[in-house]
Structures are given as C-alpha cells and as structure tokens.
Image: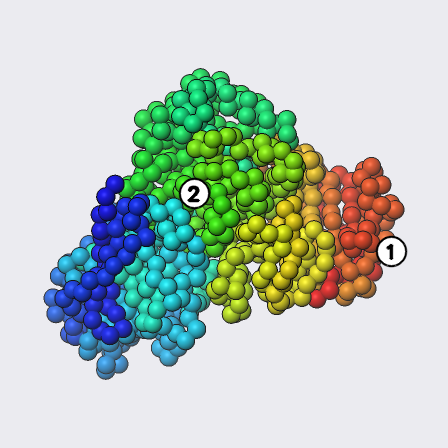
Amino acid sequence: MGAIPTTAVIPNASGTYHVLVVPSSVADSSYTATASIPQPTTVGNATGISPDGNGYLIDAGTAKARVDFTAADVFRLQLAPDGTFTDPPAGEMIPRTPATIGGITAHDHGDYWAISSAALTLRAYKSPLRFALYRADDRTLIWQETHGLTWTEDATAQTLARGGDEQFYGAGEQNGSFSHRDQSVQVGNDYNWNEGGHNNSQPFYLSSAGYGVFRNTFAPGTYDFHAPVRTAEQERRFDGYYFYGPDLKKVIGEYTDLVGKPFMPPVYGLEPGDSDCYLHNANRGERHTLDALKVADGYTANQDPLGWMLVNDGYGCGYENLPQVGQGLRDHNMQLGLWTSTGLPNQGEEVKAGVRVRKLDVGWVGPGYQFALDGCQQAYDGIEQNSDARGFVWLPVSWAGAQRCGVLWSGDQTGTYDYLRWQIPTYAGSTMSGIAYNTGDVGGIFGSDPQVETRDLEWKTFIPTIMTMDGWAQTDKQPWRFGAPYSSINQRYLQLKERLLPYLYTLAAQAHSTGVGAVRPLVLEYPDDPNTWGDAAKYEFLSGNDFLIAPVYDNSGTRNGIYLPKGTWVDYWTGKTYQGPTTLNGYQAPLDTLPLFVRSGAIVPMWPKGTLSWQTRDTSRLDYDIYAQGRSDYTLYEDDGTTRAYQQGASATQQVTVRAVGHGHGATTVTVGPSVGDYAGKPAARAYDLTVHVGAGPATVLLDHTPLTAYPTPAALDAASSGWSYDPATGVVHVKTPQQSTACGFSLLLPGAGGLAG
C-alpha cells in the first residue's frame, strides 16, 4: 500500500507555521516531514458576548465561539470560523450528549469576560480573543492560551503555555511511551504496530496541572508538548471538552463519563486466551477446527488455566463443526471465540453455536475512527443480543469510546526483548485515556523464543487480558510446548493469575465504575513524586494500587533501576521489605522470578490454591493475602461472572478492614464484613484462608474472641480444617477459619503481631 500523506498545521516557536506530513502506509508509518505554508488565520478581536440557552456565544468577526458547561468542572468550547457550528456523528464517540447546566454567569472585567460556574472561571480575553481557565476564584490559573485559536481550510490548532514542570499523558495507546512532555505524538489511525505506532490513539490528553482535553472529532491530529503546547486537528472546526480534577483519576473519570466507561468483562475474559488457525492453516498444513480440542486437552492435562480460544484467523482460515467445537471447549471450561477480517454476516448463528469472544481484524475495521467504533459495537451487541452473555471483543484499530466495547490489541509484533520492553509503558499509558484493557500477544505473533515467551507471560500475569497467538508461527507456542524449565515457570504464573482473579475482577468492576483501569503508571498513584513523572519509572507499572511490577526486559538475570515510591514495599517472593522512595539496582531475577512488590497495607483476595478455572473453583473457600500496616480497607466485588444481571444490581461486596498497631509488638486486627448483596450462585457460607504478613508472631489468634488451635507449621495447618500457624522464616501468620455464613462478618485478633516495618 502506498503512502497517503495527511497534514496538520502547527505554529512553531518563531511564530511561523508548518504543515506536518504523516503518511498512513505501514512501510512509511514512521516518516515525518515539514514544509512551510502560508500563515493561517488567527481569530481576531471579540466584539460581543450573548447568552444562548445555558451557554454563551462570543462574536469575533465572521467567527463565533461558544461555551457550554455540562458540569461545574466540565465545559465544551467550540469555535466556528464561518460562524456555523457542526457536530461529529451523534452517538459515536459520545453515546449521550450531556445536557448543559444552568447557573453559568458572564461578567465583564474590561479586557476579558469571566464565564463562571461554581468551580471554574473561563476568561475570554477580547483583543484578540484568547482563552484562559482559572479556578472559581478567577485568580488560580489552570491553563492559558498564548496565541489565539488558528485555522486553515483543513486544520485548527490551539496553543497553550506550558508550566515549568507540567507533565502530559494520554493520547490513547502510544506505543512505547506514557509521558509526553517534550514529545510530539500523533493521534490518528496508524498501521505501525511497533514502538512509535499509535493505532489505538485517542484525541484526549491530560495534564499534571489538573485538567484534561478531549477534542470532539474524528479528524487525526498532532499534539506537541514542547513549550508552548500546540495541539492540532485536521479539520476546519474547533471542538473541545475540558475537564478539571484536579486529581488525575477524576479527570479520567470525567472523560469516560462522556465517551463511555470501560465495559465490564466476563470473568473468563480475564483468564488467558489462545488463538490459532486450524482449517486451511498456510503455515502448518491442513487441519480441522475440531483439532482445537486437542490443544484444549493439552491445557487441561498440563494444568495451565485457559478461558477461551479463537479457532480461526479470518484470512482464509474458516471453521467447521462449530457447535461441536463450542461444546468441546465448554467441556474443558473454556469459551469459543472467532476472528473476522471481513465482517459479521453470520453473527446470530455463530453466537447461538457458542461464540462468546470476538476478535476484529484490520482487514475489516482497518479504516478506524467511526468505522472501527461501529464494528466494535456490532460485535459486542451481537453477543449480547443472541445470548445472556456479556460482550467481549478485541480490536486492533479504534478511536475515542472504544473502551466501552473492546479490548484494544496493539497489533502484529515479533516476540523479542525489545517488544517486551516498549509494551510496558504502552499499556500503563493507555490507562490515562480511560482504556482499561490494552494488550499484545504473549511472545508476539511472529517468531518463537522460549525465554521471551516466558518473560512476557510473567509480567502479563498482572494485566487483565492476555492471549497467545500461534497462527503465524512455524510451531505451536502453548505454554507447555517449550519443555523444561519454561513449562513449569509458565504454569506457575498462569496459576497465579488464576488465583488473583478476585483481585483483577474487582479492579474490572472499579474500572467500569470510575474509568480507571488496572494497569497504571506510577504517576497515577504518586503524582507528587517527580520520579514517577517520566523515564525514571517508565519500565514498571502498578496493577491496581497494590502490586508494583518491574519486568525484566533483556536477556539478563538481574534488573536495575527499580523505583519504589514512598511507603513500605514487600518483595512478593522473599518477604523482604524496602522503604521507599528508593531505587533498587542489581535485583536478582533469574528466569523464574518476576520482580514483584506489594504495597504494605494491601489486602489481596485470592481463590484457593489449585484453582484452574473460574468454573471449577471451590466457592466454599476464599483467601485473603494481607500485608498489615497501619489501617487499611478493601472492598471485594463479586457477581455471577458471565451474565448481564449485574446491570440490575445482582452483585455483592465484602468489606475487609485491617488495623495493625506497632511493629513487632501491639496487635493486628482483621475484620471481614458480611457479603452484602446477592447474585446467582452466591455461596451461603465459606471458609477463609488468610495469610497475614506481620512484624512478629502472635501468642494466639482469636476468632470472634475464641482462640483457634495453633499448629507448629503451615504444613501441619494445611491438614486441619481450621487453626493457625506462624512461619518465622517469612513473618507470615497463616489462619484457616471454619465455614462462616456470608451473611455475617467476623474478626480475627492477633495479639503481639504488629504490622510490617514502616
């Protein structure tokens, strides 16, 4: 495919203007060039302001600007160079256009009008028309234009002052980066699947100054975060929604209030997936779709958890015997998925045959933008309209709003350490645009390096959605295929991921509610720490706010530059504690060890040891892994995992509170509340296994003031129905309770077992 250049007008520091040329071909996707063009039009003086509904119109020659507040801390700013306002197609990026709010005032302050809500004041300077945003006091600056809005026939640009240490994030999936200060990022459809690509970008960014901007457009753009900040879109209209937090999570929440919250996945969607071509496989000869069941046999035999399988690839690899394949997979506690590169003409029949997962391909949704959103929604709705299941869709090209229907997949890559490296900031950075599910194939789609496969799987244990893809490799790449030592290491991490599903599923419910996904750059939780702003923490991330993961991304047995922010951090494997902020170098990480740390105060729900599937788990037991320090709280979310009954409130929550007094003395109290709410399959009672990381062993453990039986070792406790044991080598108290009614809470007291050092 030849290069098809697109352009964006950007004012440069000297006041002249350039056009950025961005070819859209795969071959030239990294190419950029600039060419001088005539200076575009800059908005002139404002001559009047008038109310219009709940908003205000500002006249500036033939141009008009419009300001509408949709909440006290959210407003829409539009500029129409010809005085006529237009909108993108309704219901695409923004499912429901928000109503404007009343109570907005405009006051004349001489050189500017102050348009104010209860939370914000937007200054509209008159000569020339230029905007600046302040808090409600009209004194505390948030952002300001240094140059009026500009336009040509096919582009518009806004220019803002940049704060001395202001940082910028977002722009959707930006392969290889999460922090954009002193960078220029492309926002648009792109077929560069590697570092520097942006095939799942979004016209949204947020600033450490506490604001975010969504450009309400399907036009591609260029966001230049040098000084001053210049953001340009390839259309002759300006339309932006502005959000104020100042907390970054709140900004993400406001943005996803507008374009849609991340969808709530089925629980099997958080289990690993497997993708291959069976019928007419060009790489490995003729097979049949039913041969997928032999691969499913392998997962079961090797005790490697798997939630779903894609059994075709859409490029001449069709399917046959679909109902039998679907039933065979369900017999393995797996779900059937299909891939398409052409469309969904048989969706109803396929879903009725058992299809619960869809993967869309660039061969179909490659045009991106509105086309990709429509394809994603069509696939999502097709599952829900033909079954009681939740939609679960993967897609490789998207736009703003795709988070409400899809897992965004970063495309076709070769499995190398370099591939592993740049994915880390990519997926963490995507969360800053409300993308809760962003991922790439474990070990890539091309090539097959057993070490890279294993290293990649280790860290992807802690991101919600993952799959392996074998259709373009010369050999199968399932986790047991490479033999020792890889198969046992892969099994260990897959089983850990399965046990952590209560934690990841709760994070999914939080993302569905708040817009903030599980995979987080450190800056999202530690925004006041300069070391989290950029490169110092680029190749690590948080899973929720409790796990810090610093993957090994080269052929090495050590990891350098692990930054631990403030607080006490516990090495997941050894129990060693570190006091942050600190940077670890020379961390020993042989092939079987992922550098993994847990925040002191964390309360982590887990399914019992030996769990291989959400369907076969022992619902009569639940584990809590507790890192006691000070006072901490956690709320577990549960529902039936697959149907849409949660939308009508069929769900339950359980509150856990831990209070640890002192270190090596005092006491630790664990209070597990009742499970509040109901859903199909909710257990009436369950026993609990708790591992409580403390500073010293207790003299006894009391369950609701009654002593539990003490056992000399954790192994001895394993054979008992209830009791407790302390392991001095790890500083962990193991507690097993008898069956407890889920309608009632209980408390554990560990006298003399204060919290972790801190």
Mark 1, secondary structure of its residue: loop
Which amino acid lies under the numbered mark 1 shown in the image of this protein?
Answer: Ala
Closer to the observer: label 1 or label 2?
2
Spatial CA span between label 1 and label 2: 55 Å
In the image shown, does 355 or 737 lie closer to the viewer? 355
Residue at image x 24%, y 74%? 14
Question: Which quadrant would the C terminus be assigned to in this image?
Answer: bottom right
Crowdedness of circle 1 by 10 Å Cα count: few (<14), some, many (20+)?
A: few
Question: Which quadrant would the N terminus be assigned to in this image?
Answer: top left
Residue 527 appears left or right of 105:
right
Location of residue 122 by image quarter: bottom left
Residue at image x 53%, y 40%? 449
Residue 212 seen:
no
Which amino acid lies under the numbered mark 2 shown in the image of this protein?
Answer: Gln
Q: Position of residue 403 (x, y in %)?
A: 41, 46
Residue identifier under label 2: 413
In the image shown, does 648 or 372 lie closer to the viewer? 372
Residue 40 appears left or right of 628:
left
Residue 557 appears left or right of 421:
right
Crowdedness of circle 2 by 10 Å Cα count: few (<14), some, many (20+)?
A: many
Q: Position of residue 393 (x, y in %)?
A: 42, 37
In the image shown, does 27 or 680 lie closer to the viewer? 27
Q: Position of residue 109 (x, y in %)?
A: 26, 81
Mark 2, secondary structure of its residue: loop
Residue at image x 68%, y 58%? 570
In the rendered image, the vertical position of residue 654 relative to residue 580, given as above or below: above
Residue 39 seen:
yes
Residue identifier under label 1: 699
Residue at image x 48%, y 42%? 415
Q: Position of residue 622 (x, y in %)?
A: 68, 41
In the rendered image, the vertical position of residue 728 relative to residue 363, given as above or below: below
